[in-house]
Image (cartoon, helix red, strand yellow):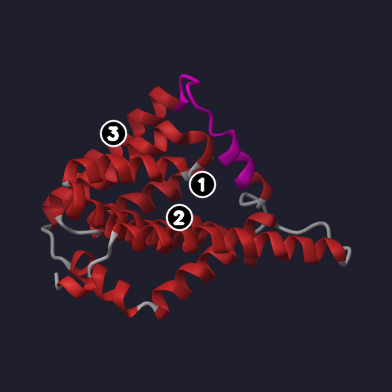
Amino acid sequence: MPQDRSYSLKEVVKQLGLILLLPAILFIITSLILESIGIKYVDTTFIFLLFQIITYTWFLAINKRFREYIRDPLCSKVKIRTAAFYIIAGFVLMALTSVLVLGTGIETNEGQRHLFESSDLHSAMTFQTIFAALAISTIIPFFEELLFRGLLFTTLSNKYGAWWAIIISSLIFGMLHGGVFIATSIFGLVFGYIFYKTKSLLPGIVLHMIWNSLSVFLT
């Protein structure tokens, strides 16, 4: 990869900070505005997800350097048999993690349950529910893999080596998922290892989408 496309760790921190904080700031401002004009009953999950998607899309659209940076790992060819093996193996490991960590009560996904319930995903099909389901199951996983594996992992790997990159990026990934830190950190290890072994973002993206889709429709 050309040197002028690579990121320093400081640049990555700034980029991730902007991408992660901007939706929250916009959400808070919007909530205050709606409350000030007397609108109280709104789908907060829909609003927050909408701002996330807008931020991710805006970042990808205006940032040519980032698009070029992740082009190779995103377009890298991987054998179907190899991809299938890592997707299936990764799914099994994530399922076992859920049983051992969530099933035994070490962590709870009540926050996630509340998120899905507040967006009323299992009620009548509306634009908001369809959007929320698609965002959580497909769009968010796609962008998270670009950011956490394509950008953060690769930058950390260039500086500290692959194994430290897997560990550090996974811990950060876990910290950003609230009350399921242990489980999502392990998920991050799985995604990071798959990317490390295949040199492609696609298997991790597919696995991430499958897992989130099941979380949406089975929670």
In magenta, the rendered stretch is 102-116
Depicted 169 relative to depicted 154: above or below: above
Give the quarter of the image for residue 90: top left
Quick check: marks 1 and 2 in contact, CB under 8 Å?
yes
Give the percent coordinates (x, y) of residue 171. 37, 39
The earlier-in-sequence mark between 3 and 1 is 3
- Furthest residue in direction right, as rendered: 38
The earlier-in-sequence mark between 1 and 2 is 2
Give the percent coordinates (x, y) of residue 192. 25, 46
Give the percent coordinates (x, y) of residue 66. 31, 72
Helix, strand or loop under label 2? helix
Magenta span has 152?
no
Quadrant showing the C terminus: top right
The residue labelled by disc 1 is: 217
Q: Mark 1: which amino acid?
A: Phe
Number of the front mark, 3 or 1: 3
Residues at marks 2 and 3, CA–CA distance in whole angstroms: 19 Å
The residue labelled by disc 3 is: 93
Q: Mark 2: which amino acid?
A: Ser
Q: How would you rate the neighbour count of disc 3 (Cα within 10 Å): few for under 14, some for 14-19, many for 20 or more?
A: some
Report whether residue 140 is seen: yes
Q: Mark 3: which amino acid?
A: Leu
Helix, strand or loop under label 1? helix
